[in-house]
Amino acid sequence: MKNKIRIGCGAGFSGDRLEPAVVLAEKGKLDYLVLECLAERTIALAQKRKRQDPTKGYDPLLERRMEALLPVLKKNKVRLITNMGAANPVAAAEAVCRIAKKLHLNVTVSAVTGDDVLSQLTGEEVALETGQPLRASGQLVSANAYMGTDAILPALATGADVIITGRVADPSLVVSPLVHEFGWSLENFEQVGQATVIGHLMECAGQLCGGYFADPGRKDVPDMANLGHPFVDVSSDGNALFGKVAGTGGILNLATVKEQLLYEVMDPSQYFTPDVVADFTQVRLQEVGTDQVLATGGRGRTRPGTLKVSVGYQAGYIGEGEISYAGTNALARAQLAGETIRQRLEGKLQDLRMDYIGCTSAHRTVFGHYPEPYEIRLRLAGKAATAAQAALVGEEVEALYTNGPAGGGGARKYLHEVVGIVSVLMPREKVTPAVTLFRS
Amino acid sequence: MKKKLYDIAHSRAGDKGNTLTLSLIPYKEEDYPLLLSQVTAEAVKKHLCKIVAGKVSRYELPNLPALLFVCQQALTGGVTTSLAMDTHGKTLSYALLEMEIEV
């Protein structure tokens, strides 16, 4: 049994950059590469693609990532763990095998399924966010339980080169190889708690290495164009030393690690995952070298008896329109344009929102005193049950060209279908993970 | 003398449904007591009154050191169905950093 392993994380969301993972696999001396590619809504959108084509429904970048990574992963004997299976891990595994064949590589792929629990829902379950039965939110399109390390371990035990899952908790992608390699007990909650801290720090990839951190003159990040993604050396006692590949851009220090440790955390004393209720409050960080931070002291207690299920529902359509005004009195002209459209769309939409980009669109207010901006972009967004109705927003904004205030330019319109997400809790016994093995 | 939080601390925003999380991390550890005494949950709620409709809770992490604010009903309904531009509220870390304290 190994006493130390190295895990890299080469993607922190589905649209993440491709190169950093290749650099990690090529030069990182990794044992495992993790790619986290599944946000809350991603799987609901993937489910819709699967309905249109049963061979689809996995991550749209899967092929591109695999073509770049498989040869180097094989060459350096790095195992890959990823949730790129999205709504269809089996089709994803078959796709990986197809690519491997094309590249003349022998690859085994283990698909982890069981997270899709849509058929088990009646619609009467009460959504945590609304307090109402699920059916009140709209037509359900997907329901996926957040599975944990116990679902991934059997796939690791097959020895497969690539483990591809649907919905699992992000930290579990990192916890599972640690438990697998070190033979930790899932009942050892202190150890699984520390492993979860490690997974949480890794799951957003570049964000640990100075991505989403830079503020010129205040928080400078060197060579951001070549931002590296992180790896972690974990020893069998759970101590974790985070680092990045020499020569890559970015920075990994106490400040970047602190920002990531608290990212999206609700109560640091009880961070719920399918594996453990982790406690982040005793974590200690130590900068031990350039781009090297040691993390210890993550703890945990008990394993939740329920799993969170993310439920996607049809939420209608959003239509948007944008147009710019510039020079003297730009804000007043933009406001007149917005008010004009509000009157023209009266009663035709469920909800209409007006934003003045350059002024109040991000914070919905202004703190302190700022001079009036030189240019303003008016943006309107409205929701409706049908695409045709939602499209009215963009059409009215475009019509400002000949029916609105002076000097409007650069009108654009957008229309998209909306899938909303709510969640319910499900007893973990009702979720049955399964593993299927494929060979190229 | 008044100073913006921007001058002594950094922050990252996160989202869970309609809930906004904001970390507040001093550049210098010795400024932590200053944040602890002045950047209370009440003060943040008051500062973000146009943004956060619900409760603001504060968690203290003296080991780091850092503070964490969890703001309910802050994301115009939540990431997936909001009509806002920044549906995740990712820019809101810099709304917190606009807050002024006495130093």
Image (cartoon, rainbow, N blue to C red):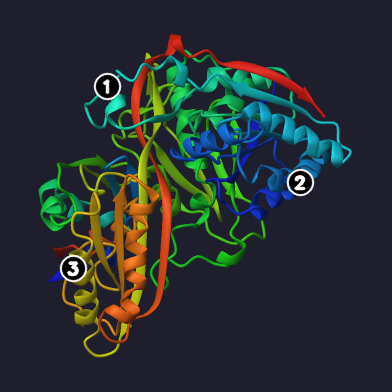
In the rendered view of the protein, which quadrant contains the N terminus of chain A? top right
Instruction: Classify mark 2: helix, strand or loop.
Output: helix
Residue drawn 34% across and 23% down? A424
The image position of residue B67, as x and y in percent, is: 26, 46
Tag count in the figure?
3
Q: Chain of mark 2?
A: A
Query: Mark 1 or 3, which is nearer the eye?
Result: 1
Mark 3 burial class by Cα count in 10 Å: few <14, some 14-19, many 20+: some
Answer with left or right where residue B32 lies relative to residue A425: left
* Depicted A439 relative to depicted A258: above or below: above
Residue located at (29% from left, 57% from top): B92
Reading the image, the residue beneath label 2 is A67
- Residue matched to label 3: A367
Query: Mark 1, residues whose alpha carbon is within 10 Å: few (<14), some, or many (≥20)?
Result: some
Same chain check for tags 1 and 3:
yes
Q: Nearer the viewer, mark 2 or mark 3?
A: 2
Residue at the spot x=27%, y=86% of the render? A406
Amino acid type, mark 2: Glu
Q: What chain does badge 3 belong to? A: A
Chain of the residue on which disc 1 is drawn: A
Q: Which is in the foreground here, disc 1 or disc 2? A: 1
Q: Quadrant of residue A279?
A: top left
Secondary structure type for disc 3: loop
Whether residue A57 can be seen here: no
Q: Which residue is mark 1?
A: A126
Q: Is residue A405 left or right of residue A258?
A: left
Foreground of the two, A65 or A6: A65
Residue A92, image x, y percentages: 67, 33
Q: Is residue B19 left or right of residue A158?
A: left
Quarter of the rendering containing residue A176: top right
| Residue type, mark 1 in image | Val
First-in-chain label (2 vs 3)? 2
